Image: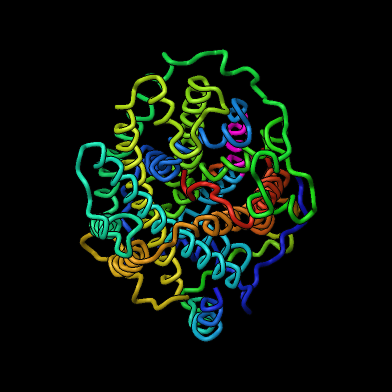
Amino acid sequence: MSTSPPRPQRTTGIFRTKTIEQSIAETTEVEYQLKKRLSALDLTVFGIGVIIGAGIFTLTGRAAATVAGPAVVISFVIAAAACGLAALCYAEFASTVPVSGSAYTFSYATLGEFVAWIIGWDLLVELMLGASVVAQGWSAYLGVFLGHLGIKIPESLSYGSSFDLPALLLVVVLTALVAKGIKESMRVNLVLVAIKLFIVLFVIFAGIGFINTKNYSPFIPPAVPAADAGHNVWTSPLLQTLFGIQPTTFGVMGIFAGASLVFFAYIGFDVVATTAEEAKNPQRDLPIGIIGSLIICTLLYVGVTLVITGMLPYNEISVKASLATAFESVGKSGYATLIAAGAVAGLTTVVMTLLIGASRVVFAMSRDWLLPKSLGTTNPKTGTPVKITVIIGTLVGCIAAFTPIGKLEEMVNIGTLSAFCLVSLSIPVLRRRRPDLKRSFKVPGNPFVPYLAAAASFYLMLTLPPRRGCGSSSG
Amino acid sequence: MILGLVIYFLYSKNNSRLAQGVHDIPAPDFSHPGPHSTTGDSPVHDS
């Protein structure tokens, strides 16, 4: 596509932009140097580690039972396609600007310093709150898992009490690991993701034997008014509440409502871009990591969904512990222990990945001197920003241990969707402003695909209800 | 977020590398046809 001559970039005022050349040059400064040790496999595993949490064991069934029936499989594919649009934009940016900071860095190069500052804070709050919420979820699943083994955590120190000790310990251990080194963190991540994948695949293959194909009929259940399904103004999508649209569940619209619900199970691939600077071959490996992890997670979600909707009629699926209950219904209650173990392993990698992401965003802001520059200096031994990692770990640990923040997870999703919007809109801006840059990966169909990605993210923000447990920020 | 805005206008706006012009590397100027382009068209072709 031929375009008009690009405009020169702003160099003054709050909308001044930073050149890609300058961003890349700063990555070689000794005091801010991160070690380049991540391969395409590491990045893909990193992506899977953050995308798949406990949601695969619960959200899949909840979406089938409440909004879409067996057709929730289609919801997962639609949500993956919508997420894929944003993932393409992240992949192009990450391959063009292989610098830490993800959406913050991309915004600084295109939309200006003030927008970058806003999105940097947005990302930071999102990642830190996300890590705290997931750490508490981890503590809850640990209690369930140990309960299956006959071990009981004292109530005054467990999930739901005023001092959540397991959540605090998890954050302390993971902070130490993240500070020790990126490769060390990735080794632990690899082991935990392998355990998680083994359990997910085991569940899929074990469940295949219990599938009754009659449960797939009707594949798209007839639509019913949402009010009849127990929804009200606080639990219906904001868009429908604002415009007074009569909400329905199931039917064809239920598939799209299901897509909005399960979209949040895919969030997390964007965190891969925060480690751009630590990749050995970022131009090639980052697009592989971002898109590869999204494809693998889509296949796993579809597999688990097919199993759970095949094992039970959709209206008999438990909303809270869908997969464990499905196995109990076929006399395999022991699998609940395995599922709880999978959730514990799954959520551990999510917390670790979010801690890494948060530290790299602050690192990038500090290196740009938007935050005190001494904060971001890396430790020459570990090659990680130790000071930032410890500060973030302390804050996350305190929030997870002492505050009841579980209900804030919807806010996390809004923050992520804002970042998706900005990154998508930045693609045509950078194409126009810097046509000379080497782009080893390019979003096809520019500017339509980036605009579509931004529109999809904006639409999803409007589908968030005023109050809804719409799933974890990371699967 | 309000705290973030306050910090930006009180601290970051005047202290960032760009504000201080440290290691400033300008981007090539594409606003007119020059040595980068003989046609004025973008060298980027969308796939």
Position of residue A412 measured from the top left corner of the image (x, y, whole percent):
52, 57
Residue at image x 64%, y 54%? A234
Residue in view at x 76 percent, y 47 percent: A2
In the rendered image, which quarter is residue A159 located in? bottom left
Q: Is A289 in front, or is A131?
A: A131
| Residue A431 visible here | no
Part of the protein shown in magenta: A74-85
Residue A102 vs A142, above or below: the answer is: below
User: Which x, y percent locates residue A46?
Assistant: 38, 44
Note whether A306 is above or below A80 in the view shown. Answer: above
Query: Is residue A429 shown left or right of residue A190?
Result: right
Q: Label the magenta part by its dominant secondary structure.
A: helix
Residue A428 included in the magenta stretch of the image = no
Can I make out residue A449 in this image? yes
State which quadrant residue A362 falls in: bottom left
Q: Nearer the viewer, residue B30 or A268?
A: A268
State the image coordinates of residue A473 (x, y, percent, origin top left). Answer: 49, 50
For this orientation, the residue located farthest to the bottom is: B10
Is residue A75 part of the magenta span, yes or no?
Answer: yes
Residue at image location 43% in from the left, 52% down from the top:
A276
Q: Quadrant of the N terminus of chain A?
A: top right
